[in-house]
Image (cartoon, grey):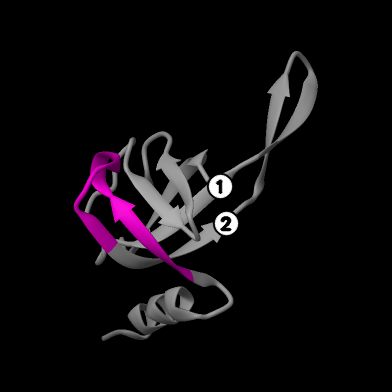
């Protein structure tokens, strides 16, 4: 295993960064238990010459856990359900991490 692969595992398994989650393809069973990292960066949107700040939720997941996440798939973290909203993208050049833009659908 490469040093980068070890770093990815450390990133997801860190108790302060990673979280246990349940993944459902298409929002349905079967359930896959995995570790994710949730990020909530602000997104700047320009509308009619005005910049607005929009809160976003990005859930990082290992490619080893989910080969191809898709729009409509869901993650449940601490009882809150997030749905992938849009096309997930690769976060790294080695294709080890998916970045999934999500929105909260249930609590």
Provide the residue designation for mark 1.
57
Residue 38 x/y as whole percent: 53, 59
- In the rendered image, which quarter contains the N terminus? bottom left
State which quadrant residue 97 falls in: bottom left
Q: Nearer the viewer, residue 92 or 32?
A: 32
| Residue beneath the point at 53% across and 80% down | 15
- In the rendered image, residue 51, in percent from the top left (x then y), is placed at 78, 27
The local crowd at label 1, few if under 14, some if 14 to 19, many if 20 or more residues have their Cα within 10 Å, is some
Q: Secondary structure at mark 1?
A: strand
**Residue at 33% in and 67% down:** 34
Which residue is outermost to the top? 48
Q: Secondary structure at mark 2?
A: strand
Q: Is residue 39 magenta?
A: no
Estimate the x, y position of residue 10 in percent, counting from the top left. 44, 82
**Left or right for 94, reference 60:** left
Mark 2, other Cα within 10 Å: few <14 / some 14–19 / many ≥20: some
Could one spot residue 50 in this view of the protein?
yes
- In this orientation, which residue lies closer to the viewer: 84 or 2? 84
For the question of whether residue 92 can be seen, the reply is: no
Q: Is residue 85 left or right of residue 24?
A: right
Q: Is residue 30 magenta?
A: yes
The magenta segment:
19-32
Tag count:
2
> Residue 39 bears which disc, if any?
2
């Amino acid at each position: 295993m490469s040093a980068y692969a070890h770093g990815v595992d450390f990133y997801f398994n860190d108790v302060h960064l990673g979280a246990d989650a349940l993944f459902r393809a298409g929002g349905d069973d079967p359930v896959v238990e995995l570790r994710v990292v949730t990020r909530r960066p602000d997104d700047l949107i320009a509308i009619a010459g005005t910049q607005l700040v929009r809160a976003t939720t990005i859930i990082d997941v290992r490619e080893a856990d989910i080969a191809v996440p898709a729009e409509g798939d869901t993650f449940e973290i601490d009882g809150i359900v997030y749905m992938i909203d849009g096309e997930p993208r690769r976060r790294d050049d080695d294709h080890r991490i998916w970045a999934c833009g999500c929105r909260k659908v249930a609590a």
